[in-house]
Amino acid sequence: MSSNEKLADLLGLTDWRDAMLRVPREAFVPDTALACPEGGAPYPIDRRARPDEWRNAVFSDTAIITQRADGHGDPSDATAGLASSSLSAPGVAFAFLDLLSPIGDGHQVLDIGTGTGYTSAVLAARLGEENVTTVEVDPDVSAQATVNLTAAGFAPQVVVGDGAAGCPERAPFTHVHATCGVAEIPYAWVEQTRQGGVIAAPWQPGRADGFKVRLTKSGGAAFGKFGGRCSYMLLRSERAEVMWRAHHTDEAEVTATTIDPRSVDEAGDGLILTATALAPGVGVFRSVGDDGSFSLLLYEVGHPEGSWAACDYEPTDGTSEVTQYGPRRLWDEYATAYSRWVELGRPGIDRFGLIVSVRGQVLWLDEPATVLGTVGRNGTLRDAGTVSR
């Protein structure tokens, strides 16, 4: 049994198995890179120095960083800047491809974020290379992807450009598949999708982690619901600083609260989506102390000098204290969203949906007519970023 067949068995692939087995995964991994196993520490791989380790990483359910700092850093060095291109873990990649179903003969796909070219090759293996258009913003990444694709025996249409604009000259498409996170689903993707067509993308309104979303075009809009959590590199035009930092502390206001920040943190995805609509642009991070103390830290996404808040739980007396700075009272906004989520019956992710139209993005609950709010480029984020306190 080949390494590719073993990996397909590990992933339990069915619909995409034949296409995957036609694509030599090793053709899409550079000689040196950084393997990032789920739940494990990243480690450098080197095909020449440690060929067995390199091959084991390639044929495992592991993400591999292939570019850093937009090409200015060593991809195998975790300290050499922001990861800017990668080969996704196959379990993650094929889970997204499953969202495109039904898909088959006669369908045309717009693939946003070529990266190494691996996903484009899988799509080409299933649909025919003439039915796959893939867009990559980085000319160097695109050029290497073309080399990889050629080596693997595939020649889909590779376009250098901003993925947010899609590829109007090749439209319309039956499917749009994004391999980069987006804070806002570009309306160009909706315009370039056929009626009844499908858009599958990592929706990351807080610029870090987010949710899988599958939308179907109907009329001039696309409607759909959310899947599980996900975290992808962002569309480059949507990058923003992701961190919490207390500044102007001498101007901050301190008050008490009866809301336990631990309960807010444990509320789950339904609260995150509610807050995305009702407290837009609020990023969330948690800090847990060895002594049982807990802090929920909030900030304005993309505004390093913007408003911030901290809700600190003190285990010795069971009280919580709120510190807030700036024109927006972020804890008040987030606490209001939490209260509203409780009033709504603590809905889970399965009850939420998204509409994307020329007017923007709208979050709904239970049915599209029940609108929670409009979400722009700065949505809500949690469990990501850095803390400076």
Image (cartoon, rainbow, N blue to C red):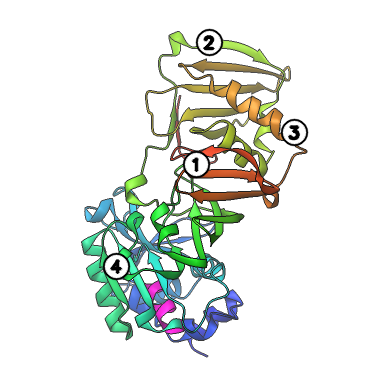
Magenta extent? 116-126
Which residue type does callout 1 highlight? Ala
Name the residue rendered at 51%, 47% in the picture.
Answer: 209
Q: Does residue 353 appear to the left or right of 143 in the view shown? A: right
Classify mark 1: residues with Cα within 10 Å, few (<14), some (14-19) or many (20+): some
Q: Are marks 4 and 2 in contact (CB under 8 Å)?
A: no
SS at mark 1 in the image:
loop
- The residue under label 1 is 384
Q: Position of residue 202 (x, y in %)?
A: 49, 55
Q: Which residue is mark 3?
A: 342
Q: Position of residue 168 (x, y in %)?
A: 32, 64
Q: Which residue corresponds to mark 4?
A: 169
The x, y position of residue 287, in whole percent, is 56, 32
**Magenta-drawn stretch, dominant element (helix, strand or loop):** helix
Residue count near mark 4 (Cα–Cα under 10 Å), binned few <14, some 14–19, many ≥20: few
| Amino acid type of the residue tagged 4 in the rendering | Glu
What residue does disc 2 label? 253
